[in-house]
Amino acid sequence: MFQNKFMLNSVLLGNLVIGGLLSGCASEPTQPKDEWEGWNRSVHGFNDGLDKAVIKPVAKGYQKYVPEPVDQGITNFFGNITDIGVTLNDLFQLKMLQSGMDLSRFLINTTAGVGGFFDVASRLDLPKHNEDFGQTLGFWGVPSGNYMVLPLLGPSSPRDAFGLLGDALLNPLTYISFGSSAAVGAAITGAKAIEVTDTRADLLTSEKIVDEASVDRYDFIKNAYQQNREYLVYDGNPPEQKDDEVDIDELLTGNTESTGNPVSAPQSPIPASSTDTGLPPVTQGGNDLGRQNDNSGPAPVVNQSRRLLELSPPE
C-alpha cells in the first residue's frame, strides 16, 4: 500500500516541474492561503532529507547500471497496469470515447506488447492518458481543500489523499498481495520498490530544473502542484478567474446587468441646437443647414476658437 501511494505521488512530480515553469511565464493566479504551512514545511523537509539519504542514491545507481531499453520496458510495464485504473476513472467521469481508447490501449499492450513491456498502442495513435480517482472526485465537484504535504508521499490535498485510496483499490497488484503466500507478497513488494526507483530515476533531470528555477523550493512545488491538479481536473480548461474589468459594450450601451449601476453613454461632442451652447446657427447664403434662423441679415461674426473647442473629440 505504501509503495503504491508513493508511486502515485512520484509520477506527479514530472508534471509539477512543467506546470511550475509554465506558471513562471504566465500571469500568476491568486493562490489560496496555506493554512497548514508550518506542518507542511516540516514534512517537506523530512521528505527531502529521506529522499537525499536513501531514495535518490538508489535511483542514481539504477539509472547508471540499468540499460535504457530495460529502463523503458519497466516504465511501460507499470504504466500498462495503471491503465486499468485510468480506464475506470474515464468511465466515472463519463468520458466514454477516452475510456474505449484506454481499454484498447491496455489490451494491445498486454498482448502485442508482451505484458506491457513494449508500448505498441502509442504507435497506433492510442496515447496514454492521466486520470486518477482524485480527478474523478474533482469532476463531481468535490473541493480540493487545503494544500497538505504527506509524510513519504509528498504534496497532496484532502481530496487527493482520499483519491489515493481509490487508486489503490483500482490497482490489481493490491488484490494480488492480499491472501497470497509470503513469496508472492515479497515479489509484489519488490515489484513496487522497483517501480518507485524507476519513477524516481526518471525524475532526476526534472529535479535539477526545480532546484535551479526556484527561489523557495517549497513554494515552487506547492504552486506547481495546485496548478497542475487544477489543469488535470478540468482537462486543460480551468475556469477563468473573475477580474474587475470594464466591459466596453456596457459603457457604450449603458447595460447594468453585470454591475447593477447605470453607465452613462458618452455624449456627442456636437451640440444638438444653438441654445445648448449659445452659439449662433450655421447658415450658408440663404440656405438653412438644419437650424432655426429667423434673421435674414449677414452671418454674425463669431469666435471660431470657441467652436473649435466645442467640436474637439472628448479625451
Image (cartoon, rainbow, N blue to C red):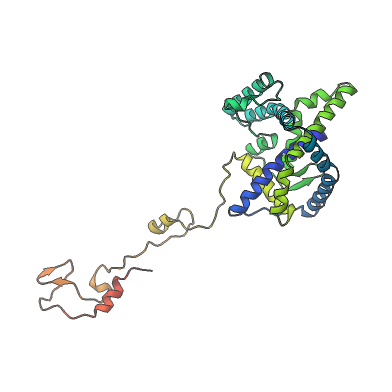
Q: Is residue 301 left or right of residue 25?
A: left
In the figure, 100 relative to 153: above or below?
A: above
Q: Residue furthest right?
A: 182
| Residue 273 on image: x %, y % | 24, 69
User: Which quadrant, please, contains the C terminus?
Assistant: bottom left
For the question of whether residue 5 can be seen, the reply is no
| Residue 93 on image: x %, y % | 62, 32
Q: Residue at x 68, y 34 (%)?
A: 132
For the question of whether residue 73 can be seen, the reply is yes
Q: Quadrant of residue 158?
A: top right
How many numbered discs, if any? Answer: 0
Q: Residue at x 15, y 71 (%)?
A: 283
| Residue 85 on image: x %, y % | 69, 28
Q: Is residue 4 left or right of residue 16?
A: right
| Residue 203 on image: x %, y % | 73, 41
User: Which quadrant, please, contains the N terminus?
Assistant: top right
Most foreground residue, 183 or 178: 183
In the figure, 203 relative to 279: above or below?
A: above
Q: Quadrant of residue 140?
A: top right
Most foreground residue, 290 or 56: 56
Q: Residue at x 31, y 65 (%)?
A: 268
In the figure, 125 relative to 258: above or below?
A: above
Q: Residue at x 60, y 26 (%)?
A: 123
Q: Quadrant of residue 70?
A: top right
Most foreground residue, 245 or 98: 98
Q: Is residue 32 left or right of residue 186?
A: left
Most foreground residue, 240 or 196: 196
